[in-house]
């Protein structure tokens, strides 16, 4: 049983979750900031 390897995989999966959350936030922000998304709100 390799404890170091297991801890490493947990760390990697946690980093992946953080990265995907950041990516979702970035995509959401770019949608809000894009002019095509904003134009209906400008009327």
Image (cartoon, rainbow, N blue to C red):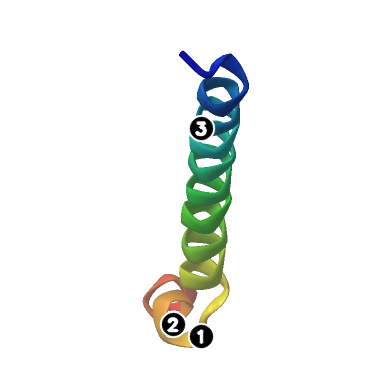
Residue farthest toward the bottom in the current orientation of the protein: 36
Q: Position of residue 30 (x, y in %)?
A: 54, 71
Q: Position of residue 3 (x, y in %)?
A: 56, 15
Q: Position of residue 5 (x, y in %)?
A: 55, 28
Counting other residues with Cα less than 10 Å from the Cα at mark 1, is it few (<14), some (14-19), or many (20 or more)?
few
- Identify which residue, 35 or 26, lies in the foreground: 26
Q: Position of residue 18 (x, y in %)?
A: 57, 40
- Identify which residue, 5 or 21, lies in the foreground: 5
Which residue is identified by label 2? 39
Q: Identify the mark at residue 35; answer none if there is no mark.
A: 1
Q: Is residue 36 above or below residue 18?
A: below
Residue depicted at 62% across the width and 22% down the height: 4
Kindly report the distance in space between the C-alpha atoms of the residues bearing marks 3 and 1.
41 Å
Front: mark 3 or 1: 3
> Horizontal placement of 1 versus 29: left or right?
left
Residue depicted at 51% across the width and 22% down the height: 6
Rendered-image quadrant of the C terminus: bottom left
- Identify which residue, 18 or 11, lies in the foreground: 11
């Amino acid at each position: 049983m390799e404890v170091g390897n297991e801890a490493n995989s947990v760390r990697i999966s946690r980093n992946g979750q953080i990265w995907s959350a950041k990516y979702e936030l970035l995509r959401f922000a770019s949608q809000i900031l894009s002019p095509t998304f904003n134009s209906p709100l400008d009327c």
